[in-house]
Amino acid sequence: LSTISEQLANNLPCLPSMLRELGYDTRFYHGYQSRFYNRRAFLPKVGFENSLFFADVSEGRSVEEIGWGISDEAMLGLMLDELQSLASPFFAHITTLSSHYPFHWQWPEASQSAQFVESGDKLYDNYRRAVAYEDYAFGKFWEAFQRSPLAENTIVVYTADHGLAMGSHGLLGKQNVYEQSMQCPLILRGPGIAKGKSSEAFTYVHDLYATLCNLAKV
């Protein structure tokens, strides 16, 4: 069974591998270490030509850390700087890290609202602080991205790998089949995408492959 699984994994049609064949520079960014989930070995199999795990190369550098690794604000800024220097079209993926469970990190004061009211539930309050930080970090990135030349011809996808059951159904922070864990936000911005429109249609992550190929005209 493991041999069959490996053969399937090595031959799955993946967006980065398809785009790499078309001349795209394919890049993966993460603030933690490449050994986690054996990503260093896995990513080339799905088409990522370059990967940067900043925790692997940050020794001696003064970079802010939050929780499991390098802060999302620092990683998003680093990614944007690199992407602006590329001469070829690119497909880049970044996995955010700072707002990951268990949420009890030291958040920058600038990311926290002065009007935040404690609910009495420590875990939930820490979760809200994590969400506030992620809004702040991505907001800083988005402002810089909008000022960059990339804004004119880059498709941006913002989504998550899973939701979170914050005490729903007697579960806490565990993946399950309930709606709270299955549904994720999905935001698309870029050329050819109408602004200000939303949809309640049920979609799968597989739909992104065809959607992005259509938008990029590949």
Image (cartoon, rainbow, N blue to C red):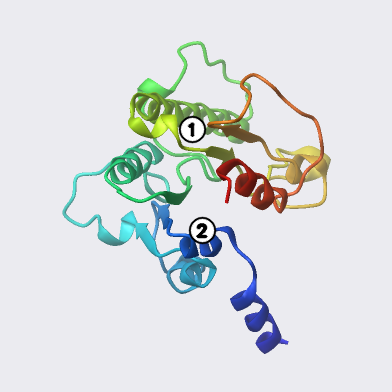
Q: Is residue 199 left or right of residue 3?
A: right
Q: Is residue 199 left or right of residue 190?
A: right
User: Residue furthest toward the top?
Assistant: 115
Question: Could one spot residue 20 in this view of the protein?
Answer: yes
Q: Residue at x 16, y 54 (%)?
A: 60
Question: Could one spot residue 107 in this view of the protein?
Answer: no
Q: Residue at x 60, y 34 (%)?
A: 188
Q: Secondary structure at mark 2?
A: helix
Q: Is residue 181 left or right of residue 133?
A: right
**Quadrant of residue 137 in the image?**
top left
* Amino acid on which disc 1 is placed: Glu
Residue 203, relative to residue 150: is it above or below?
below
User: Which numbered marker is on residue 134?
Assistant: 1
User: Residue furthest toward the left?
Assistant: 60
* Amino acid on which disc 2 is placed: Leu
Q: Residue at x 64, y 83 (%)?
A: 7
Q: Where is residue 181 drawn, in percent x and y?
A: 74, 45
User: Which numbered marker is on residue 186?
Assistant: none
Q: Are marks 2 and 1 in contact (CB under 8 Å)?
A: no
Looking at the figure, which quarter contains the N terminus?
bottom right
Instruction: Estimate how packed mark 2 is, as few (under 14), some (14 to 19) or many (20 or more) residues with alpha carbons within 10 Å.
Output: some
Q: Where is residue 139 drawn, in percent x and y?
A: 44, 26
Residue 41, relative to residue 147: is it above or below?
below
Q: Earlier in the sequence, mark 2 or mark 1?
A: 2
Q: Nearer the viewer, residue 160 or 59?
A: 160
Give the residue at mark 2: 19
Q: Is residue 184 left or right of residue 86?
A: right
Q: Residue at x 38, y 60 (%)?
A: 51
**Quadrant of residue 85 in the image?**
top left
Instruction: Estimate how packed mark 1 is, as few (under 14), some (14 to 19) or many (20 or more) residues with alpha carbons within 10 Å.
Output: many
